[in-house]
Amino acid sequence: MPEAHADDDRPAAPTPEPGAAPVPGPAERPVPASADEAASEGADAPPAVPSEEELVRTATPATVRRAPRYRAFATAGALLGALLGLVLALVLGPDRGTAGTDVGVLPFLDGQNTVRLLAALAGAVLGLLVGAVLALAADRRSTRGRR
């Protein structure tokens, strides 16, 4: 009767009875020399290896398509666009003395902060579109020679 390991749910390998012939493991089984021997041994035998001529006759040529990852292009474009929009809002925005005017529901979005947020969002949307267009252009360019 197989015994279970203490750290495992799998049963242990059966131990041969004294005087019985040992059962060969998968690595110790002899490999048949021909397809006829493999057929006579049953379904456990490995399939026959095809010849070089048969492989050449049945093989179909394959091509590797190197398509760009659209999500990566769009994400990179959105992040770069948001950063560019934020930098433009900081550099070009007028510096009005609106500090200390905590008005509204979200006080951190008053005055210049609203302008910065909207510039970053607009830059993100534009960057996303530019990234998607660049991905489409790269995809078209990668398939140009195969048509």
Image (cartoon, rainbow, N blue to C red):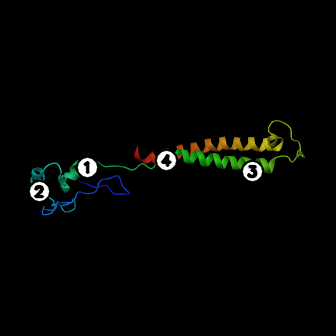
Query: Quadrant of residue 71 in the image?
Result: top right
Q: Residue at x 49, y 47 (%)?
A: 141
Amino acid residing under circle 2 = Ser
Question: Along the horizontal axis of the image, is 72 left or right of 86?
Answer: left
| Mark nearer the N terminus (1 vs 3) | 1
Amino acid residing under circle 3 = Val
The residue labelled by disc 1 is 59
**Residue nearest the observer in this picture, 29 or 54:** 29
The kind of secondary structure element at disc 2 is loop
The residue labelled by disc 4 is 141
CB-based contact (under 8 Å), mark 4 and mark 3? no
| Mark nearer the N terminus (1 vs 4) | 1
Q: Nearer the viewer, mark 2 or mark 4?
A: 2
Q: Residue at x 20, y 56 (%)?
A: 52
The kind of secondary structure element at disc 3 is helix
Q: Which mark is residue 87?
A: 3
Report crowding for label 2: few under 14, some 14 to 19, many 20 or more residues within 10 A (C-alpha). few
Q: Nearer the viewer, mark 2 or mark 3?
A: 2
